[in-house]
Image (spheres, grey):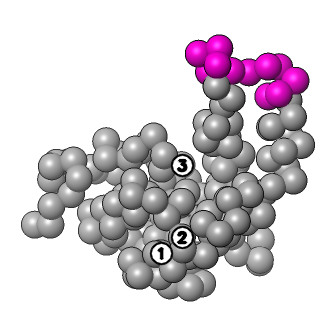
Amino acid sequence: MPVNPTGVAPHEFSCEFPVRKVVLAYSGGLDTSVILKWLQTTYACEVVTFTADLGQGEELEPARQKALLLGIRPENIFIEDLREEFVRDYVFPMMRANALYEGQYLLGTSIARPLIAKNRSRSPTPSGRTPWRMVPPARATTRYASSSATTA
């Protein structure tokens, strides 16, 4: 049986429905790359990666290349430009509210997570919306990644 990051046997990650496809909020970093392989190994499911372009520029292509290297088909790699919405609806309100972490630091990654979650839950197919069913994250899911599943 393959080893997974949690050390918990795959049968302990039971769902009430079979997991066939997972949409992963993917950055190309260590955490999301590990969870990508864990999802493939544990659920033997198709993984679709969703990467939000929030202005990171040169980091996007390496994320695409790493997803390909990890076995994701090109048609299952989605990078969406969310820069305008991010600045308009998240960064400006955060700055107006003087939202600081520990009274010193601007909120970084955490301010983008709601926007990423909102857009990740949309269907990446141009033919229309597919109802992605949200499932509770497994214990191996880090604070940087989560998964969605559908029975389609």
CA separation in Å, label 3 and label 1: 22 Å
CA separation in Å, label 2 and label 1: 6 Å
Confirm or deny contact between disc 3 and disc 1 (CB under 8 A).
no
Q: What stretch is highlighted in magenta?
A: 94-104
Query: Disc 2 vs disc 1: which is toward the camera?
Result: 2
Crowd class of label 2 (few under 14; some 14 to 19; many from 20; radius 10 Å): many
Q: Position of residue 20 (x, y in %)?
A: 42, 69
- Say which quarter of the image contains residue 92: top right
State the SS at label 1: helix
- Nearest the eye: 135 or 81: 81
Please name the residue shown 34% across and 51% down the image. Answer: 15
Read off the residue under disc 3.
Answer: 134
Viewer can see residue 129: no
Q: How many marks?
A: 3
Read off the residue under disc 1.
Answer: 67
In the rendered view of the protein, which quadrant contains the N terminus?
A: bottom left
Q: Position of residue 124 (x, y in %)?
A: 68, 70
Disc sitting over residue 90 in the figure: none
User: Would you place residue 41 above or below residue 111 in this image?
Assistant: below
Please name the residue shown 87% across and 53% down the image. Answer: 84
- Nearest the eye: 100 or 11: 100
Query: Disc 3 vs disc 1: which is toward the camera?
Result: 1
Read off the residue under disc 2.
Answer: 63
CA separation in Å, label 2 and label 3: 24 Å
Please name the residue shown 71% across and 45% down the image. Answer: 115
- Say which quarter of the image contains residue 83: bottom right
Confirm or deny contact between disc 2 and disc 1 (CB under 8 A).
yes
Residue placed furthest toward the left: 1
- First in sequence: mark 2 vs mark 3: 2
